[in-house]
Image (spheres, rainbow, N blue to C red):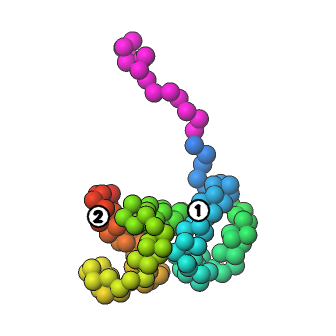
């Protein structure tokens, strides 16, 4: 590497912890549970959004994450966090964002139903579709 470029290299940072650890799982789930609290969702809705059973959900709510989260759960969480972030930009007041989720929507994606109905359809593709819709609404092209 030429000397001129070597002096401008980025500082080396500590590596990020692996995402498949119990500690990272607990931290991500804590964010998820704050999100669902803001959206006024119950345990049954949380189960559907995460794609897990009741026993697993309540263990996680109690902070009992014994292993790293499965890739399928991490994928669901990534879409939900994208949705939350987009709503924070589009509707920065938590009550407005929660209300939008429950408001009938004429957009073709929702067909007159609500975004929450689409999210609770249970398929990861529904989470992906809503995340992409909101990214497009805010002017981002992150699909």
Q: Is residue 50 visible?
A: no
Number of numbered discs on residues: 2
Would you place residue 143 above or below residue 102 in this image?
above
The quadrant where residue 101 appears = bottom left
Estimate the spatial distance between the alpha carbons at disc 1 and disc 2, rounded to whole Å.
Answer: 24 Å
* Secondary structure at numbered mark 2: helix
For the residue pair 111 and 4, the one nearer the viewer reads as 111
**Magenta includes 84?**
no
Structural crowding at the residue carrying mark 2, measured as other residues with C-alpha within 10 Å and reported as few (<14), some (14–19) or many (≥20):
some
**Magenta includes 14?**
yes
Whole-percent x and y of residue 124? 44, 73
Q: Which residues are magenta?
A: 1-15
For the residue pair 126 and 93, the one nearer the viewer reads as 93
Question: Which label belongs to residue 128?
Answer: none
Please name the predominant secondary structure of the magenta segment in the image.
Answer: loop
**Quadrant where the C terminus lies?**
bottom left
Q: Which residue is mark 2?
A: 136
**Quadrant where the N terminus lies?**
top left
Q: Which residue is mark 1?
A: 31
Position of residue 134 in the picture relative to residue 28 (left or right):
left
User: Which residue is at a point 57% across and 43% down the rendered structure image?
Assistant: 16
Position of residue 12 in the picture relative to residue 66 (left or right):
left
User: Which residue is at a point 27% across and 83% down the rendered structure image?
Assistant: 106
- For marks 1 and 2, the one nearer the N-term is 1
| Badge 1 vs badge 2, beta-carbon distance below 8 Å | no
Would you place residue 95 above or below residue 19 in this image?
below
User: Which residue is at a point 59% across and 67% down the rendered structure image?
Assistant: 34
User: Which residue is at a point 38% across and 83% down the rendered structure image?
Assistant: 103
């Amino acid at each position: 590497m030429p000397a001129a470029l070597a002096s401008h290299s980025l500082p080396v940072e500590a590596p990020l912890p692996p995402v498949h650890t119990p500690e990272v799982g607990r931290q991500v789930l804590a964010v998820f549970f704050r999100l669902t609290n803001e959206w006024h969702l119950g345990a049954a809705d949380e189960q559907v959004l995460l794609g897990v059973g009741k026993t697993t959900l309540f263990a996680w709510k109690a902070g009992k994450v014994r292993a790293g989260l499965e890739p399928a759960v991490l994928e669901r969480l990534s879409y939900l966090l994208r949705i939350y972030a987009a709503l924070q930009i589009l509707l920065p007041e938590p009550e407005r964002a929660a209300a939008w989720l429950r408001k009938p929507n004429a957009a073709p994606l929702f067909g007159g139903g609500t975004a929450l109905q689409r999210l609770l359809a249970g398929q990861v593709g529904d989470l992906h579709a809503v995340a992409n819709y909101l990214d497009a609404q805010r002017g981002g092209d992150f699909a």
